[in-house]
């Protein structure tokens, strides 16, 4: 069954890139695109995606904070952080809030599909920090 | 007593008995018919009948102009009496225009005058009629007395008394009487001057009623006395006054005095050099009828001192003089309303409104305004189109992809910048950051402050301050400082002339980041252009020196020399800035590989992680050094 992905990234370029790369897999399809962290919660509740990809650096609240708010309300949500901010502290923060994966930009199609697949094998944290 | 008019063939001599008589009432109407029938031609016989006895029910007098309308009734009667006395026939006095001299009062005045003349004529005619009536009564009394005397005489004759009698014809009756022919002639009536004065005493007109039955005619002295009595001393028209005292002056409205009319002032006015529609977006269709929504042409740049409106001053009015030799006030020209809003000033001569500052001109609240800070309350999108602003620009919203924003001053953006082109003569501040989607571009002649920058290119002649720079191409003539927020520089190419400071450079994935401390392309371009211009200037100055030696003006030389001084000064500044490149360094709290570093032409690749390091050019070794 096709899985719906919600992309949260201020870069439309990344959204287009992900859309293009998802064509390699019949399993994933973008359900909605959201350009900032503020819109994440509403978009999630409206489209009920199977997976959410969130950038860290965005206008307004950053992706870590937006994901944290989402997971506090919807712990069942599957969140993957997609960012260039690949540092120990950001990865730790992502893990602490309950993100199921961390995808570094730029990424290959296979990296993206793998991390998505991996996220569906994991169980979302029941009590994220 | 009846008489026939000279050409109308109708009875016109009036008496009190004729008033109310339908035949008499038809008189004016018949005149009107005559006029509307096309002139004063002699009517046909059948017309005469109709004129005399069958009046039309109504007359659309409004079809006539006033001048062409029938002359006043009593004036016509008086005229007829006069003509009859003179035993002359004339077709005059049919219409109002017949009583006017060549210079006619204006229509309103003429109407008033005609009414007054008619009133005077009525009094004059009535007076005569009364005199005639009295005369007639006297004759009748006399005749009655004669009749009585005759009867008494005949009785006496029958009784044998012999009295000598004369036979006097009267109404078909032979009456013997003493000579009373003098009584048949109405008593003499002196000529009369009717003086008409314009309500504002601008002119005076006279009409003379002729003396009747041998009365005393109007003399020149009499006219002058009337003028004097009324206090008319200015603008007397001698020829016309003299004419009044002659026969030809009778029944003609003649100007006797005319003052000098005041000349009203002329209001000042404003001639706009810019349309009053400026300042709000408007669509312009091209020849195919297509509107370019990106270019809504509503921000009209204006340079300082540009003339916005020409001001035509009011013209003063000129006082007049009335016929009593008194001054007549005039209306002064009013000053035009000056649409002078913010940053719009009146020039020293008071002849124009000018822009006080360079900026955007708009017309709001009935005033031209020049603002050097334009505020866009929302996004730069299809509602605003591309913007090109003189002065500062404040955008409260976002700059959407595909739009171009230019300002000669600073640009402040409250939201984000997408794949748009933003160019400022001053600094650029982007509050929420920029993701250029590989096409977005910021260019500032001064500093750039931006929360974060991703997938964009940037040029700044000053310094750059950001929280993070990711996958961007940055050229900065000053320093790049990313020490706030996450303080990261990841990927892309970063060129700065004054040095780079960051918390983190690169990331854990080994993403390649290129850092250079060297002259930026825009710096080199400016320097090259400056050098070329200076060469041209020196060439021109040499030519000027030769020209000067040949006696030509030195004015251009001074301008060239001033320009040369300024450009030399700027070149010196650039050279100083270039010299600092050698001292430029990269200071970073954590450096992740892979980072290519180019300092003062020397290149190095960092392949391992460094904490709290400083990268600089070691002139002794002519190489890049990293110390941690």
Image (cartoon, grey):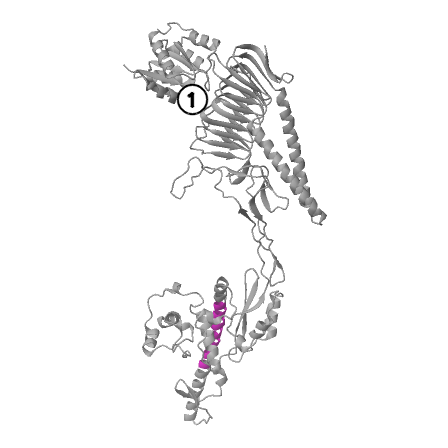
x%, y% of residue A120? 33, 9
Relative depth, front residue between A21 and A15? A21
Q: Is residue B576 above or below residue B276?
A: above
Question: Closer to the camera, A61 or B458?
Answer: B458
Q: Is residue B138 magenta?
A: yes
Q: Main secondary structure of the magenta part?
A: helix
Per the image, is B499 magenta? no
**Label 1: few (<14), some or many (≥20) within 10 Å?**
many
Residue at screen point 67% across, 39% down? B562
Residue B445 visible in the shown view: no
| Residue span colored magenta | B117-140
Residue B309, compared with residue B145, is above or below; it is: above
Q: Horizontally, is B597 left or right of B399 in the view?
A: right
Using the image, name the chain to which the residue with label 1 belongs.
Answer: A
Tag 1 residue:
A11
- Quarter of the image for residue B530 reads top right
Position above or below: B504 against B538:
above
Query: Residue B226 location, x and y as percent?
Result: 59, 69
Residue occupying the far left of the picture: A1
Helix, strand or loop at mark 1? loop
Point out the image quarter for the C terminus of chain B. Answer: top right
């Amino acid at each position: 069954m096709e899985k719906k992905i919600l992309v949260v990234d201020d870069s439309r370029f990344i959204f287009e890139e992900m859309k293009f790369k998802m064509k390699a897999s019949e399993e994933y399809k973008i359900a909605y695109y959201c350009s900032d962290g503020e819109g994440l919660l509403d978009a999630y509740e409206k489209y009920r995606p199977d997976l959410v990809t969130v950038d860290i650096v965005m206008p307004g609240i950053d992706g870590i904070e937006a994901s944290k708010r989402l997971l506090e309300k919807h712990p069942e949500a599957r969140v993957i952080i997609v960012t260039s901010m690949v540092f120990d502290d950001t990865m730790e923060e992502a893990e602490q809030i309950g993100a199921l994966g961390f995808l570094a930009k730029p990424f290959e199609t296979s990296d993206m599909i793998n991390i998505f697949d991996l996220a569906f094998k994991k169980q979302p944290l029941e009590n994220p920090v | 007593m009846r008489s026939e008019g000279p050409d109308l063939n109708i009875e016109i001599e009036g008496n009190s008995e004729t008033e109310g008589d339908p035949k008499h009432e038809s008189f004016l109407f018949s005149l009107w018919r005559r006029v509307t029938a096309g002139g004063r031609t002699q009517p046909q016989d059948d017309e005469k009948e109709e004129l005399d006895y069958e009046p039309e029910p109504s007359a659309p007098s409004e079809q006539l102009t006033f001048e062409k309308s029938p002359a006043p009734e009593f004036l016509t009667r008086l005229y007829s009496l006069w003509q009859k006395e003179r035993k002359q026939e004339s077709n005059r006095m049919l219409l109002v225009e017949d009583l006017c001299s060549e210079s006619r009062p204006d229509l309103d005045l003429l109407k008033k005058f005609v009414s007054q003349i008619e009133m005077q004529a009525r009094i004059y005619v009535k007076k005569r009629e009364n005199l005639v009536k009295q005369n007639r009564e006297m004759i009748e009394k006399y005749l009655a007395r004669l009749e009585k005397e005759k009867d008494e005489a005949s009785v006496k004759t029958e009784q044998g008394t012999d009295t000598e009698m004369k036979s006097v014809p009267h109404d078909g009756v032979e009456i013997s009487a003493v000579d009373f022919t003098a009584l048949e002639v109405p008593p003499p009536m002196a000529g009369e001057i009717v003086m008409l004065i314009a309500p504002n005493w601008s002119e005076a007109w006279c009409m003379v009623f002729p003396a009747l039955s041998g009365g005393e005619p109007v003399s020149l002295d009499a006219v002058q006395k009337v003028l004097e009595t009324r206090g008319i001393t200015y603008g007397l028209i001698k020829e016309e006054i003299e004419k009044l005292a002659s026969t030809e002056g009778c029944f003609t409205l003649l100007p006797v005095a005319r003052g000098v009319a005041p000349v009203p002032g002329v209001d000042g006015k404003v001639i706009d050099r810019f349309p009053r529609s400026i300042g709000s977006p408007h669509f312009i269709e091209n020849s195919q009828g297509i509107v370019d929504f990106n270019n809504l042409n509503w921000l009209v740049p204006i340079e300082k001192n540009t003339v916005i409106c020409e001001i035509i001053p009011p013209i003063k009015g000129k006082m007049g003089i009335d016929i009593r030799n008194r001054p007549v006030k005039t209306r002064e020209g009013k000053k035009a309303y000056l649409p002078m809003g913010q940053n719009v000033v009146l020039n020293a001569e008071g002849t124009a409104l000018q822009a006080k500052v360079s900026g955007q001109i708009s017309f709001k609240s009935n005033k031209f305004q020049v603002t050097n800070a334009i505020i866009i309350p929302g996004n730069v999108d299809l509602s605003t189109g591309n913007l090109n602003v003189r002065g500062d620009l404040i955008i409260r919203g976002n700059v959407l992809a595909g739009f171009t924003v230019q300002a000669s001053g600073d640009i402040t953006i409250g939201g984000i910048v997408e794949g748009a082109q933003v160019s400022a003569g001053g600094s650029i501040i982007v509050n929420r950051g920029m993701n250029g989607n590989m096409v977005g571009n910021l260019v500032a002649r001064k500093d750039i402050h931006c929360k974060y920058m991703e997938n964009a290119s940037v040029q700044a002649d000053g310094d750059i301050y950001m929280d993070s720079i990711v996958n961007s191409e940055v050229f900065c003539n000053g320093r790049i400082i990313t020490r706030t927020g996450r303080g990261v520089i990841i990927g892309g190419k970063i060129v700065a002339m004054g040095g780079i400071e960051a918390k983190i450079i690169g990331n854990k994935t080994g993403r390649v980041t290129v850092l250079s401390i060297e002259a930026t392309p825009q710096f080199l371009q400016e320097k090259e252009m400056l050098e070329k211009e200076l060469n041209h200037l020196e060439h021109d100055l040499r030519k000027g020196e030769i020209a000067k030696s040949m006696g030509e003006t030195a004015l251009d030389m001074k301008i060239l020399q001033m320009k040369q001084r300024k450009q030399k000064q700027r070149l010196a500044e650039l050279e100083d800035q270039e010299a600092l490149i050698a001292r430029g360094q990269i200071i970073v709290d954590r450096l992740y590989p892979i980072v290519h570093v180019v300092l003062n032409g020397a290149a190095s690749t960092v392949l391992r992680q460094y904490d709290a390091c400083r990268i600089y050019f070691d002139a002794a070794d002519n190489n890049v050094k990293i110390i941690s």
